[in-house]
Image (tube, grey):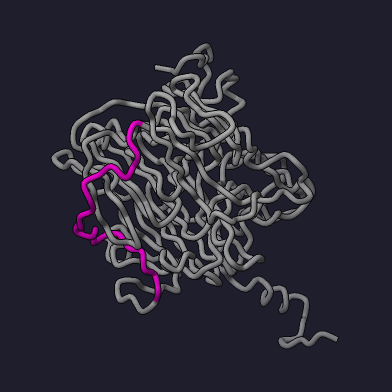
Amino acid sequence: MPGAGQSTKSTKFDSKTFHFTDTQSASPVAPNDPYTYYSGFGNHFESEAIPGTLPRGQNSPQNVKYGLYAEQITGTAFIAPRAQNQKAWLYRMRPAVAHQGFKDMTDAPETESCFLPLNPKVHVSPTQLAWTPFDMPSDDEQVDFVHGLRTLAGSGEPTLREGLATHIFTCNTSMSPAHTSFVNSDGDMLIVAQEGALDIQTEFGCLYVQPGEICVIQRGIRFSVNVGGPTRGYILEIWGSHYELPELGPLGANGLANPRDFLVPKARYEVNPGEWKIVYKVAGKWFYSTQGHSPYDVVAWHGNYVPYKYDLTKFVNVGSISVDHIDPSIFTVLTARSRDPAAPLTDFLIFSPRWDVASNTYRPPYYHRNTASELMGLIYGSYGGRSDEFAPGGASFETGCTPHGVAYEEFKGATEAPLGAMKISEGTIAFMFETSRALVITEWGMKSEKKHEHDPKMWDDLVSNFEKVMKEEGLEEKGVAE
């Protein structure tokens, strides 16, 4: 059921719309989203499940109202510049330190965090790779979000505080009813819902994330993923950095992902006694602790280190209104900085419904060799420029400087097609995890039965049209610029 204050009057709501505005919804969320949210990106928020709980004029009073404990979570160094400094104060029934100690867990063999070439469990691939849709758990399996994680590719290593990992998750079992919570102590996770909704319980409140939406849960924050059946998605985990909005430069103050369209949970607490299991990932290793109370006992909080979600159909696409393509950086939703000021650690891009109006222009992606490594996924719809096996729930990979582009048949069709204003990518959202770093593939990714290489024969028909013209016009076989 919709949360309080949300409109259900719109009968046109379609999650695969050309743009969110086509739904004519008065609510910022889909009608089936059960929660209400604050809006804004990077803001300092405050939230109280019981009004009057937050202390005023200070963070850590001698006595917090209702006998609560004050606890701070920092997302940056204490002395980080104000523009980058991130933290939150939580007022809770028991602090997170109230647990029965840590124990080793068996490391998940299909997850990976060390992507240095000396690791024998990662592989370098110069060629284009792709994976057909990853299988859901079978009906006789009970797999939650944590146990459904599989690492596909990455770069760097979390203890070095720079790098990233890309994961696939498939699950069919909820975590909260089993009193299980997860903490990623390595980095921030950008979660892309692909099939099935994610009802995510966090220390700050709840997020409802459906296909076509993403969420970001930062390092050190506890959360549980609850599902209503078979569920699949993608994760871009980053180390030593945080996601932020890309600069707009000459675009001005508006466009791409607008800050007000990001949604933040509202405080929500529970008194849920019984043993809880808190699973930790630390430097790629797995541990757990137990405690006799719910980790979701936060009555009030304030700060700017807060999970958030975003509906990708709200993205404001921009492009050329004369000729040629603008570089694909115009499709960036979120970015994360690296130590190189001229190259981001990663960008999260989407390719969604938009108009193409460029005149006298070759419309498909031109042939190119980018310095960036790319891992693409498809949330729904179909996406040209990839093999026919590139389907929702699958993935495609190209390392930096690998040449790519369409087959000759598509090239020839594009050179002969009449040009006019046209909608492209209708009913589709594809995305790209792009990084300035070289990605390596995990053992699980390389040995997956879903993996296949792009067949180079698809480009065999790329004939040399120049040679034909050369003979017709009597051009020399060798030429030198004057």
Look at the image and tell me whether residue 42 can be seen.
yes
Check the image and name the residue furthest to the top.
9
Tell me the quadrant of the picture where the C terminus can be found: bottom right
- Spot occupied by residue 378 in the image (x, y as percentages of width and height): 45, 47
Relative horizontal placement of residue 73, taking residue 443 as reference (left or right): right
Relative horizontal placement of residue 481, taking residue 307 as reference (left or right): right
Q: Residue at x 39, y 63 (%)?
A: 153
Q: Nearer the viewer, residue 31 or 208?
A: 208
Q: Residue at x 26, y 57 (%)?
A: 286
- Spot occupied by residue 206 in the image (x, y as percentages of width and height): 41, 31
Q: Residue at x 55, y 47 (%)?
A: 86
Relative horizontal placement of residue 218, taking residue 85 as reference (left or right): left
- Spot occupied by residue 337 in the image (x, y as percentages of width and height): 59, 59
Say if the magenta span includes residue 106.
Answer: yes
Check the image and name the residue furthest to the left.
140
- Determine which quarter of the picture holds residue 268: top left
- Spot occupied by residue 157 in the image (x, y as percentages of width and height): 41, 67
- Determine which quarter of the picture holds residue 49: top left
Q: Is residue 183 above or below residue 369?
A: above
Q: Nearer the viewer, residue 27 or 160?
A: 160
Say if the magenta span includes residue 7.
Answer: no
Q: Nearer the viewer, residue 275 or 186?
A: 275
Main secondary structure of the magenta stretch: loop
Tell me the quadrant of the picture where the N terminus can be found: top left
What is the magenta range? 93-116
